[in-house]
Image (cartoon, grey):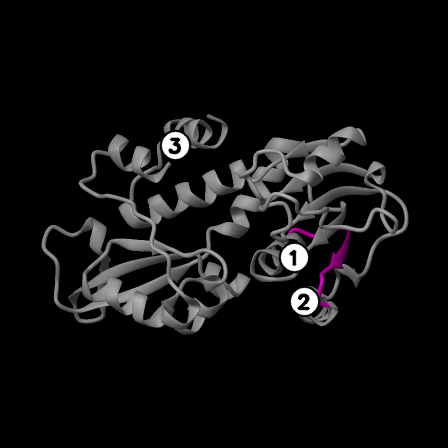
Amino acid sequence: MQNAGVAALGLNWRYLAFEVHPDDLRAALEGARLMKFVGVNLTVPHKVLAVEMVDVLDESARLWGAVNTVRFEGEEGREAWRPLGQMDELPRSVRSHGFNTDADAIGRAVVEDLGVVVAGARVLLLGAGGAGRTAAFKLASESVGQLFLVNRTGEKAKAVEREIRSRWPSVEVTTGYPSGAVDLVLNATSLGLRPGDGLPLDESQFPLRQAGAVYDMIYRPAETPLLKAAKAAGCRVANGLSMLLYQGAKALEIWSGKAAPIPIMRRALEKNVYG
């Protein structure tokens, strides 16, 4: 997806994947800075850890409490910084600037793929880790009607609930399954990634037929056990492909300063995921 976008923009860049242990994240970011990378994306479990490791935080990273995109910037003059991807000559002094492109991608994806307007909606959110926490804050910021948080570790869900109550006091948020129907079930857990995974929710406490729509952030496999069960229950369903597309497109724009070629990136992504 990113390499298709890079090629369409005529950039002499290459997007590569590197496996980094969480204990080595700070060293990896410092290495990328010293080698003058244009930028990096971060996946689970690095997003929250990186908040304390970058030199500067964009408002998006401060607001959502996680970093999924880092842009490296060179000093052009006294306290003047410019993205390395937009400089002709690379400077000696380079800093890291952290952004979050996940939250806006979540909001755009559920509207476009499922027609769910968050404001006033009843939403069951599964997972309160990095992705779940960001999703919860995004939903709260868009005036979700009622937000129900379910997580394997109850205290983590309680912590997210307390933070939402502090930052968005008008939002009705609670931990545990709802009684009655919801407009959207949003899966932010990793259950469904591996063959043999079960459902990320307990259907004895919340039958899927009570959900109008189900969005699974997982995009590979394209149909998770949750989406298969939700489809059988008559729900509108979508996987995480659009979310991945939109957060990646925004990252490319942050690095390059150019509008991302979204249709080209989408085609490349769909070919990779769906074959």
Residue at 83%, 55% in the rendered image: 177
Q: Earlier in the sequence, mark 2 or mark 3?
A: 2
Q: Name the residue under label 3.
A: 265
Q: Earlier in the sequence, mark 3 or mark 1?
A: 1
**Name of the residue lying farthest toward the left:** 89
Q: Which mark is residue 160?
A: 2
Label 3 SS: helix
Q: Are marks 2 and 3 in contact (CB under 8 Å)?
A: no
Question: Around disc 2, counting alpha carbons within 10 Å, would you say few (fewer than 14), some (14 to 19), or many (20 or more)?
Answer: many
Label 2 SS: helix
Q: Which mark is residue 202?
A: none
Residue type beneath disc 1: Ala
Q: Which of 166 and 94 is in front in this view?
A: 94
Question: Around disc 3, counting alpha carbons within 10 Å, would you say few (fewer than 14), some (14 to 19), or many (20 or more)?
Answer: many
In the rendered view of the protein, which quadrant contains the N terminus? Answer: top left
Query: How much space separates mark 2 and mark 1, taking CA atoms?
Result: 8 Å
Query: How much space separates mark 2 and mark 3, taking CA atoms?
Result: 33 Å
Q: Do the residues labelled 2 and 1 touch (CB within 8 Å)?
A: yes
Q: Mark 1 points at which residue?
A: 136
Question: Around disc 1, counting alpha carbons within 10 Å, would you say few (fewer than 14), some (14 to 19), or many (20 or more)?
Answer: many
Residue at 65%, 57% in the rendered image: 136
Left/right placement of residue 96 relative to residue 182 reads left
Residue 135 drawn in magenta: no
Q: What stretch is highlighted in magenta?
A: 142-153
Q: Which of marks 2 and 1 is nearer the N terminus?
A: 1
Left/right placement of residue 102 relative to residue 129 reads left
Residue 146 drawn in magenta: yes
Q: Position of residue 236 (x, y in %)?
A: 72, 30
Q: Quadrant of residue 210?
A: top right
